[in-house]
Image (cartoon, rainbow, N blue to C red):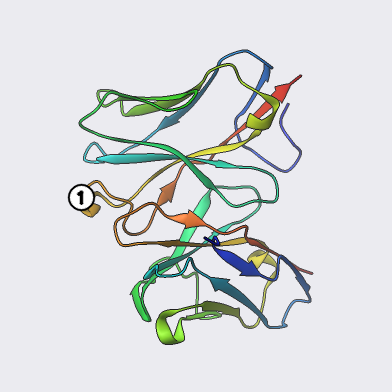
Amino acid sequence: GESVGLHLPTLSVQEGDNSIINCAYSNSASDYFIWYKQESGKGPQFIIDIRSNMDKRQGQRVTVLLNKTVKHLSLQIAATQPGDSAVYFCAEPPVGAGGTSYGKLTFGQGTILTVHP
Amino acid sequence: EAGVTQFPSHSVIEKGQTVTLRCDPISGHDNLYWYRRVMGKEIKFLLHFVKESKQDESGMPNNRFLAERTGGTYSTLKVQPAELEDSGVYFCASSQWYDTQYFGPGTRLTVL
């Protein structure tokens, strides 16, 4: 469930299940998106990115899907493990960054993922 | 290669006191960013250095916050005087130009 004092979306899954974490954006001109994972007591860690000329990008156990029509992206984690428990943030740099990470990143509110053994 | 380091990891101070946070970026990274996460909300941008110059300080909340990066290496973020609403986790990130921003572990600041 949701931790007291926090108002972040939460997702609880069983180990081995697939997880889907969602993020909406508002600027139709946004051209680059990044997913970060933040474990307790650590800083955000880069997971995967996607540019707007792509609909899908796959990494190791992670897939990001981008739906530009509804301005939505999702992070799919396959065979979720307890070590995946963390807060997941989507982020985007300024539109003028030309599809790079240069400049101010704007983060989404984050989703708390809890994986139960 | 060492990652971004931040000091201290935790700081607890009284309202009205001064606190200085330090960030050491990855060696060779000209871009250095400060962000903070307050009360479990989203991470918010504070400012961006390119070498020793402030490229973008649009996120600095008020003049109680002062960031410096003398010599273009490490950076400090001073809060003077600290207020209750300044409590949160302050992150530093660095990057090589257009590359990925790599974050440090953060400094948790508690203002009582």
* Above or below A52: residue A101: below
User: Residue, x 20% and y 31% (percent of image)?
Assistant: A53
Which quadrant of the view contains residue A103? bottom left
In the rendered view of the protein, which quadrant contains the C terminus of chain B? bottom right
Which quadrant of the view contains residue B64? bottom right
Q: For this view, does A14 lie left or right of residue B56?
A: right
User: Residue, x 55% and y 48% (percent of image)?
Assistant: A44
* Above or below A28: residue A99: below
User: Residue, x 39% and y 53% (percent of image)?
Assistant: A105
Q: How many marks?
A: 1
Crowding at label 1, few (<14), some or many (≥20) Cα neighbours within 10 Å?
Answer: some
Along the line of sight, which residue is nearer the eye, A4 or B99? B99
What residue does disc 1 label? A98
Name the spot of residue B43 as percent of width and height, x first: 52, 52
Which quadrant of the view contains residue A102? bottom left
Name the spot of residue B109 as percent of width and height, x first: 70, 66
Q: For this view, does B85 lie left or right of residue B44?
A: right
User: Residue, x 67% and y 31% (percent of image)?
Assistant: A83
Q: Amino acid at mark 1?
A: Gly
Name the spot of residue B65 as percent of width and height, x first: 54, 78
Name the spot of residue B20 as percent of width and height, x first: 64, 80
